[in-house]
Image: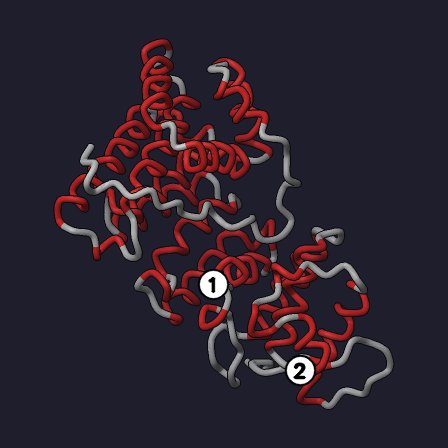
Amino acid sequence: MFPSMLLSLMLAVSPPEPGGGQAAKPAVLQKHWAERKFDAIERGLRESCTADPAGFEAQFDSYFRTTQTWEADRNALEQWRQQAPDALAQALVEAIYWRAYASQLRLGAVGHLPKEAMEFYQEQLGRGVARLQHVKAQANSCPLWHSLNISLQLEGAGSRRSAASAYLDAVQAFPNDLQIHFAMSRAYSPRAGGSAVQFDQFARRAMFFTKAAEGSAMYARLYWREDGNGSDAIQFREQRSLPEWRMVKAGFEDLLQRHPQDLRGRNKFASFACRANDRETYLKLRQELGERIMPELWPDVASVEVCDRKLGKGGSTATSPTQAGGVNSHS
């Protein structure tokens, strides 16, 4: 460790899963970890691999980044590894640990780190990749192995090319796992050195892989995950720009058809409809939402108050053909 380089910077964990995700659960796995109940964590992983791999990852990622008891946690991981060197759960938790530990060095883009810090950063990520590789024979028993592998490659342990190769392996085994597609999408995000065209091409590709189970929902999910505030907010500026509103709209419709009680998805759909100036869709969704507004899903540049003033709140307001279709409504 080099104390002069370590920063006590807390990075945000992955954003909540876009649409139709598992409901929030008590931090049971965090409790098991604090009590060093390794067998209970193994059982938890077996359940999570089929039901909620993202939840397993989020609980440990949040724990390590929040508590920052790095030495004690590293000692516990070594103890667990000695007891069960081929345990998949141990390898996954250790990979999450090294990614969180390395993140202390991040301040802005990884490429801006001083050389010494960059080498140390990549070394820690490499430890996570090495631990995953040790249990690679079990990779196809749990999609979390694949999404973590992609994540670590993109964080700095590998390259976009190696991550892309890992992604192809992953979708062969688990084409419908959301976290695998979410992890790889970071490589193409304009905020991470990609471009709008690259991101859109990836979104269409991921939609192809998940079409049988998701319809067009993956396209909407990925743009939901990419959405942010200020200049990072997704906009629909003119026809034929990216993303295509007609595809985002179709994606949300497929998402809500499969998850009709998804209030988060309905809020985000309405937020996008507002930005696309699709008044007919916005008013329909706004009436369905009523007072069940989740402000965190509406970016600061298009809050529900702004959208209501612009497009109305429901009722019998007439719509023009242009407003009904919104921008990007033509192929």
* Front one among 165 and 293: 293
Identity of the residue drawn at 63% across and 67% down: 250
Name which residue type carries label 2: Gly
Mark 2 lies on residue: 325
Residue shown at the point (46%, 15%) measured from the top left: 36
Counting from the top left corner in percent of width and height, residue 84 is at: 37, 12
- Residue 204: assigned label: 1
Q: Are marks 1 and 2 in contact (CB under 8 Å)?
A: no
Q: Nearer the viewer, mark 1 or mark 2?
A: 2
Q: Residue furthest left?
A: 115
Task: Identify residue type, mark 1.
Answer: Arg
Q: Position of residue 62 (x, y in %)?
A: 47, 37
What's the residue at 64%, 39% (across, down)? 24
Answer with mark 1 or mark 2, whichever residue precedes in sequence.
1
Looking at the image, the residue that sits furthest to the top is 83
In the picture shown, does residue 67 fall above or below 110? above
206 lies left or right of 280: left
Q: Secondary structure at mark 1?
A: helix
**Left or right of 157, for residue 267:** right
Q: Is residue 151 above or below residue 138?
A: below
Query: Could you tell me how far apart the alpha carbons at marks 1 and 2 are, in whole angstroms?
Result: 21 Å
